[in-house]
Image (cartoon, grey):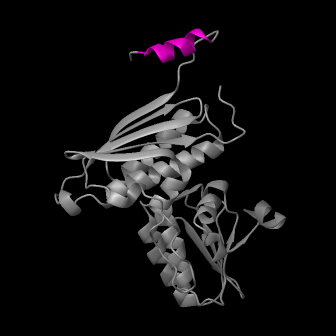
Amino acid sequence: MTSNPRQNAEIQGRATARTQPMFHRVLRAHPQTVRDTLGDIRQRFREDVSEDTLGRLELVLAEVLNNVTEHAGTGDAVRSRTPSIHLCIVRHDSGLACAITDDGASLPDDCILPRILPTAEFPDLPEGGFGWYLIQDLTQALCYYREESRNFLAFSVPFAYDEASH
Amino acid sequence: MQLLVTDTDTHLVITVNEARIDAAIATRFKDKLRETIVRHRKPVEMRMRAVEFMDSSGLGAMIALRKALPEDMPLILKGLTPNVERVFRLTRMDTVFDIRPETENEEKRE
């Protein structure tokens, strides 16, 4: 990996350079594969981040990966094959930076527009529509774009207030 | 599916021994328990201590179970772990369930 001048400056400012833990995986959009991958991510970061942050990361990634899995073969991607997902997570000083790309259906145009919760009055309780709300609520710097046949989604899951960076 | 269903006089007690209520099992979880809940037609108490993770599809399944009961018949949730409690709280669905802490006896027994 190449380093830019800013990263070099940070390294020189410390007694020892700390390698930031990361996770990279290419996976098929299938519920069991998503489940296994989330387990591996938990293993990868459990020494480095708090249980609270790990829980928020796992929930956000589950929502994003489930969306890709559920909407495979719909919209403009009517085809039988399972989308391929590239997932990368890097620990930064303020949180976990995540980048996810996939070759499945386009995300909805309004996925990064602010959402409000569906109203909840018994018996008209919504059974869905929470996924993007949770993603928006638990992330910072959420951005999305589509380039040719791939979706690009990036965001950060911040550390808790009392979780000092190492 | 790891579910233990006990019919006490007053309640249907369901102990969920699945570690995850996620997209991989949400539909089966919902179908199986909705049938049980509708058949017994009495207040439900779900013991959730073994559930370490729930996503929005799991939440959707829980809401479907809540709707399988009349409004005046409670669905009590006990022993929510932090990751599961977070999903109910962030989506404000904690208001449509009767969320209670486990009593000391229940914690020891399980």
Estimate the x, y position of residue A24 in percent, counting from the top left.
Answer: 40, 33
Residue farthest left in this picture: A79
Dividing the image into 4 quarters, which one contains the N terminus of chain A?
A: top left
Estimate the x, y position of residue A59 in percent, counting from the top left.
Answer: 52, 52
Identify whether B57 is placed above or below B30: above
Residue at horizontal 57 percent and vertical 9 percent from the top = A12
Estimate the x, y position of residue B59 in percent, counting from the top left.
Answer: 52, 67
Residue at horizontal 46 percent and vertical 61 percent from the top = A131
How many numbered circles does the render carry? 0
Does residue B50 show up? no
Dividing the image into 4 quarters, which one contains the C terminus of chain A?
A: top right
Residue at horizontal 24 percent and vertical 52 percent from the top = A82
Q: Within the image, what quadrant is residue B83 found in?
A: bottom right
Q: Is residue A20 magenta?
A: no
Does residue B48 show up? yes
Q: Within the image, what quadrant is residue A4 found in?
A: top left
Residue farthest right in this picture: B104
Residue situated in front as seen by the camera: A160 or B58: A160
Identify whether B82 is placed above or below B101: above
Residue situated in front as seen by the camera: A131 or A155: A155
Question: Residue A66 vs residue A75: left or right?
Answer: right
Q: Main secondary structure of the magenta part?
A: helix
Q: Which residues are magenta?
A: A3-13
Estimate the x, y position of residue B80 in percent, counting from the top left.
Answer: 67, 62
Residue at horizontal 53 percent and vertical 45 percent from the top = A57
Question: Residue A148 vs residue A112: left or right?
Answer: left
